[in-house]
Image (cartoon, rainbow, N blue to C red):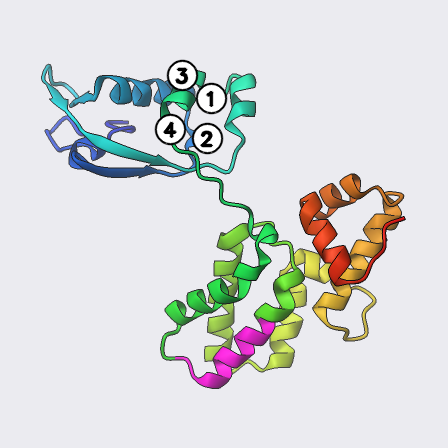
Amino acid sequence: MEGAFTGASRGGKKGLFEMAHQGTIFLDEIGEMPVATQVQLLRVLQEKEVRRLGSDTVTPVDIRIIAATNRNLLEEIQEKKFRADLYYRLNVLNLYLPPLRERQEDILPLGMELFNRLWPESDGNSRKTVRGILEKLQGYSWPGNVRELSNLLERLSLLLQQGAGPDFIRRYLLQSLPQIQEMGKGSSGGELLEWERERILRVLKENDLDLAKTAAALGYSRSTLWRKMKKYDIESK
C-alpha cells in the first residue's frame, strides 16, 4: 500500500508529514503501530526529513508530534511490541489522563457539553432529563471511557428527539449498559447509585474484604474504591 505511513503517493502527492511541516501532527493509538512502521517513524524523528515514494530527493520537515495510547508502553517494550528507542524519543512530555471512572466529577459537565453539541436546539426539559440521568450514572465505571459516554449521549439525544419518555430511557439504559444491567438484577426500581452500593458490597464479600482484589474486580483504582466506600458508608474490617 503506497504511503501507508506518510500518506505520500508515487504521483507526487505530499505525505502527511510533509503537509504538517512547521506544524503539529497527532498520532492516535500509537501503541497499535506495527514495529516496522515504528522504525520508519523513528527515522523521520531522528533525521527530520522524508522522501516521497519513488524519489531520490529528501525533504526536511519540522514537526511537533503528539501521540496518544491507552496501552502501557513500558510493558509493550518488555514484550517486544514497542521499540524502546522510539518510546524515549517520544516521551519528552508525558501527560497522564485518568480514566473516566477516576474523575467522576467530570461526567456531568462533560456529558452535558457533549449533549449540547449533539442537539444544540434541545429544550430545557430534555436537558433536565439528561442531567438527571448523568447524575445517576456517576456511579458507573465507564469501561469505554469518554467514547462510551459520547456514544451514550448520542443515543439519548436520538431517543429524546423521537419523544421517548424517562421510563423508557431508564429501561433502555438497563439493557444497553452491561454493568448497570448487572447492578439492576433483582432490583425493584431502586436508584442506580443504590445498585452500585450493593454491587460493591457483593464484590467485597466475594473477595473476602480484600480491597486490592475488590478494586481490580470492579475496575476501580484503590483510591476510587475508598472514596465510594466512604460515600456509601461501607466499612472495611
Q: Is residue 223 above or below residue 158?
A: above
Going by the image, does 66 lie left or right of 15? right
Q: Helix, strand, or loop for circle 4?
A: loop
Q: Quote the CA–CA distance across marks 3 and 2.
A: 14 Å
Q: Mark 4 = which residue? A: 92
Kind of element beneath mark 3 = helix
**What residue type is disc 2 on?**
Gly
Q: Quadrant of the N terminus?
A: top left
Tell me which label, 4 or 3, sits earlier in the chain.
Answer: 3
The answer to whether residue 195 is left or right of residue 83 is right
Say what amino acid the circle numbered 1 marks: Phe
Vertical order, 201 against 78 (above or below): below
Can residue 153 be seen? yes
Relative to 154, say whether 188 is above or below: below
Q: How many angstroms separate mark 4 from mark 3 (CA)?
A: 12 Å
Numbered label attached to residue 31: 2
- Residue 59, position as x, y percentages in the image: 12, 23
- Helix, strand, or loop for circle 1? loop
Q: Is residue 15 above or below residue 57?
A: below
Q: Percent position (x, y) of residue 42?
A: 32, 20
Amino acid type at mark 4 = Val
User: Which residue: 84% across, 41% down?
Assistant: 210
Residue pointed to by mark 3: 85
Residue 82 is tagged as: 1
The residues colored magenta run 122-133
Q: Please tell me whether the stretch drawn in magenta is mainly helix, strand or loop.
A: helix
Q: Is residue 220 visible to the viewer in this orientation of the structure?
A: no
In which quarter of the view is residue 67 placed? top left
Q: Are marks 2 and 1 in contact (CB under 8 Å)?
A: yes
Considering depth in this image, is 152 or 228 the residue closer to the camera?
Answer: 228
